[in-house]
Amino acid sequence: MFHETITHAGGTTEGVASEAHAVTLLDRAVRRQYAVEATPAGGALITWTRHLFGPGATSVVLVDRSIRLDPMTPVGNLTDAVREDLALVDGDPHARYELQQERRVITGGLWRIPPFATAGLRARRLVVEDRGHVRLTLTARLGLLAHAHRTTTTAPRGWYHPSAYESAGLNRPGRRAGLLRDSTSTAVCTCRELSAVAGDRDEARRLARDHRRAVAAAFVTARFALPVTA
Ligand SMILES: [Zn+2]
């Protein structure tokens, strides 16, 4: 279950969204080419811009709209051990609950998740029983996606003393009192698919955001397939 916050012309509306409703919202958003991002808590942010004609239909007004889905139970820290357990469950369509010595475990037959870890996955709403089988929740999938794509941008170097080599190229723009300015910033992602140098940090942040949106769109199109983690 998610808290749903819709930002529209009249302000914001709060509500509650089931997992099925959240899936519908994400599907529709990607089909309409709205921007979707997964949040580390296991939620999602959908944003788009509406083009409205202003008075006299001569001007176009851009209006930002959004739907924010915040999980009622945030995924918390997705440690290596938790992610390994979730990968086991996700990789086996026969994953199910079983009582072993009166304690509940998740098992696929050839593997089992010990009672304590099983209890943790259930309490954190990372898994759910669905038609006799145990599967990952949408919250777990969104959290894993955000975890697989943690982006950062580097701080620009700013003004610096050029090396002797750089001093040789004198008429550089941006040169001041013998100093050179470097405003470039690099955007990188933990998935290693993104490593780009931008002219400044704002541009680097845009590159990082575009990357997170691209992987989220692919994730929805692939029916919420788990990201491949390093
Ligand atoms: Zn990435």
Image (cartoon, rainbow, N blue to C red):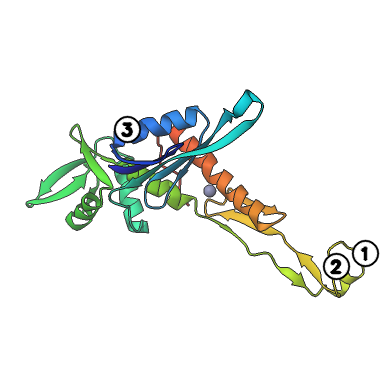
* Residue at 32% in and 32% down: 21
Q: Residues within 10 Å of mark 1 (few under 14, many from 20)?
A: few
Judging by the rendered image, the residue that carries numbered circle 3 is 21
How far apart are the alpha carbons under marks 2 and 3?
56 Å
Q: Residues within 10 Å of mark 3 (few under 14, many from 20)?
A: few
Q: Tell which circle, 2 or 3, labels the residue nearer the N-terminal end.
A: 3
How far apart are the alpha carbons under marks 1 and 3?
60 Å
Residue 187: % across, % down: 62, 55
Amino acid type shown at disc 2? Arg
Judging by the rendered image, the residue that carries numbered circle 2 is 175
* Residue at 33% in and 45% down: 139
Q: Is residue 110 above or below residue 26?
A: below
The answer to whether any part of residue 223 appears in the image is: no
Amino acid type shown at disc 3? His
Mark 2 residue element = loop
Is 180 or 79 nearer to us in this picture? 180
Amino acid type shown at disc 1? Asn
Whether the residues at callouts 2 and 1 have beta carbons within 8 Å, the answer is yes
Is 214 or 201 nearer to us in this picture? 201
Q: What label does residue 171 carry, if any?
A: 1
* Residue at 35% in and 59% down: 77
The yes-or-no answer for disc 3 within 8 Å of ligand 1 is no
Farthest residue toward the front?
Answer: 56
Mark 1 residue element = loop
Q: Residues within 10 Å of mark 2 (few under 14, many from 20)?
A: some
